[in-house]
């Protein structure tokens, strides 16, 4: 049996199908890319409404999966943009009804943790979750995933996107800045804003634009921004690790695709004698496979809901959702069983 998961929290519409060993049977995605400027929720939602039916059909065909093979239908309940979430939830409800299968709501942030955890085979890692809208250091404690530190203003990815667009580029900015930074090498001082285990980025944005106006070349600007911002993330992750006496870190979220960030966190963790794992890029960015996998864990832990209780939750926080599968590991396959799943990605 497999679980089908639908992701539609922001710019990406995605359908994933995974089996009970967390092998990705199928993954189809399409990212809404505005011609200029940032994302408009209504336009992104229209994109998802148009594309999701086709993505579902393609995922079923790619994975040679029949509706009868589907154990449950999962969807990202939140956090995210309301209209986008509703597009995915509506498709999930329709499939659950048409196929007479249980419907499972999933927290998007928890799903970033769970896919990284199962692929890494690490049992209790600290997660650095660095995406467009979210920047959090997360660890499990007493029944919940806890947010130990987070951004006090924008998510790091939104900050990188905003900067790149202000410099004349188009969304998404993170990968473009990464390529640009490889050509740079002069480090210009920027505000280094770490407050305990929290971080802030808007001061860097203002200062970087001021440097740009003074004629600092774009590659050096990109390099300075990356080094500064990723140092901040590495520092708060190290603080969490030290505090918890932890030995493992996993990365998640679109910004976790970045090689410089991966390298800096790896050096920090390995310097402390621990292990760092980053999922393949297709599973770092928003994807339906992580929703399907977390849906499988939640379904087997009894967290299905009737359709009338399946409203989306645009502001749902990581630390508000129950994760009973973490307390009863025997209920579902543990990471050691599923660690081979990395091959499938
Ligand atoms: P969430 O809903 O979890 O906040 P999201 O909607 O922003 O996520 P993701 O796919 O997790 O979606 O992340 C997208 C972000 O990742 C964008 O801001 C993009 O610029 C950034 N990103 C993608 N690749 C890279 C990279 N190589 N380096 C830096 N940033 C990257
Ligand atoms: Fe995400």
Image (cartoon, grey):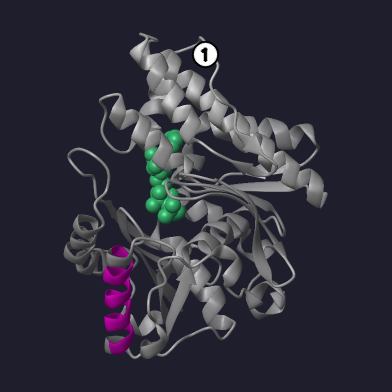
Name the residue nearer the viewer: 162 or 110: 162
* Principal secondary structure, stretch drawn in magenta: helix
Determine whether the beta carbon of the residue marked 1 sits less than 8 angstroms from the nearest atom of ligand 1: no
Residues in magenta, as a range? 84-97
Task: Residue lying at the far right in this picture: please name it.
Answer: 245
What SS does tag 1 mark? loop
Find residue 43 and report its horizontal and vertical position in percent. 19, 56
Residue 243 left/right relative to 74: right
Task: Say above or below: 268 vs 23.
Answer: above
Which residue is labeled 1 in the image? 188
Name the residue nearer the viewer: 277 or 241: 241
Residue 68 left/right relative to 22: left
* Residue 37 visible, this orientation: yes
Say how many tags the image has. 1
Residue at 72% x, 58% y is 124
Could you say which quadrant of the image residue 17 lies in? bottom left
Find residue 210 and report its horizontal and vertical position in percent. 40, 18
Residue at 56% x, 67% y is 21
Residue at 51% x, 60% y is 109
Name the residue nearer the viewer: 284 or 27: 284
Residue 316 left/right relative to 99: right
Task: Say above or below: 144 vs 130.
Answer: below
Assess whether residue 87 is covered by the magenta stretch. Answer: yes
Assess whether residue 147 is covered by the magenta stretch. Answer: no
């Amino acid at each position: 049996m497999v679980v089908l998961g639908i992701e539609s929290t922001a710019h990406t519409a995605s359908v994933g199908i995974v089996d009970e060993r967390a092998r990705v049977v199928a993954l189809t995605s399409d990212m809404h890319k505005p011609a200029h400027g940032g994302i408009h929720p209504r336009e992104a939602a229209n994109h998802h409404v148009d594309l999701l039916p086709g993505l579902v059909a393609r995922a079923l065909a790619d994975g040679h999966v029949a509706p009868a093979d589907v154990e449950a239908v999962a969807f990202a309940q939140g956090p995210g943009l309301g209209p986008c979430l509703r597009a995915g939830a509506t498709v999930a409800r329709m499939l659950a009804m048409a196929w007479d299968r249980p419907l499972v709501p999933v927290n998007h942030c928890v799903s970033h943790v769970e896919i990284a955890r199962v692929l890494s085979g690490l049992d209790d890692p600290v997660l650095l979750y660095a995406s467009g809208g979210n920047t959090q250091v997360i660890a499990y404690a007493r029944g919940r995933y806890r947010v130990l530190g987070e951004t006090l203003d924008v998510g790091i990815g939104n900050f990188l996107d905003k900067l790149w667009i202000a410099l004349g580029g188009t969304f998404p900015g993170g990968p473009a800045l990464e390529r640009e930074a490889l050509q740079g090498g002069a480090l210009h001082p920027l505000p280094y804003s770490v407050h305990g285990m929290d971080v802030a980025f808007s001061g860097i944005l203002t200062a970087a634009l001021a440097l740009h106006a003074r004629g600092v070349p774009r590659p050096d600007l990109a390099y300075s921004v990356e080094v500064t911002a990723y140092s901040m993330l590495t520092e708060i992750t190290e603080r969490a690790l030290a505090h918890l006496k932890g030995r493992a870190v996993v990365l998640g979220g679109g910004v976790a695709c970045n090689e410089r960030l991966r390298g800096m966190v790896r050096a920090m963790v390995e310097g402390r004698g621990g292990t760092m794992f980053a999922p393949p890029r297709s599973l770092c960015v928003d994807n339906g496979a992580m929703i399907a996998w977390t849906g499988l864990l939640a379904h087997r832990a009894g967290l299905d809901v009737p359709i009338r209780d399946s409203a989306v939750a645009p502001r749902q926080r990581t630390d508000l959702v129950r994760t009973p599968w973490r307390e009863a590991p025997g209920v579902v396959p543990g990471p050691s069983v599923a660690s081979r799943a990395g091959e499938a990605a």
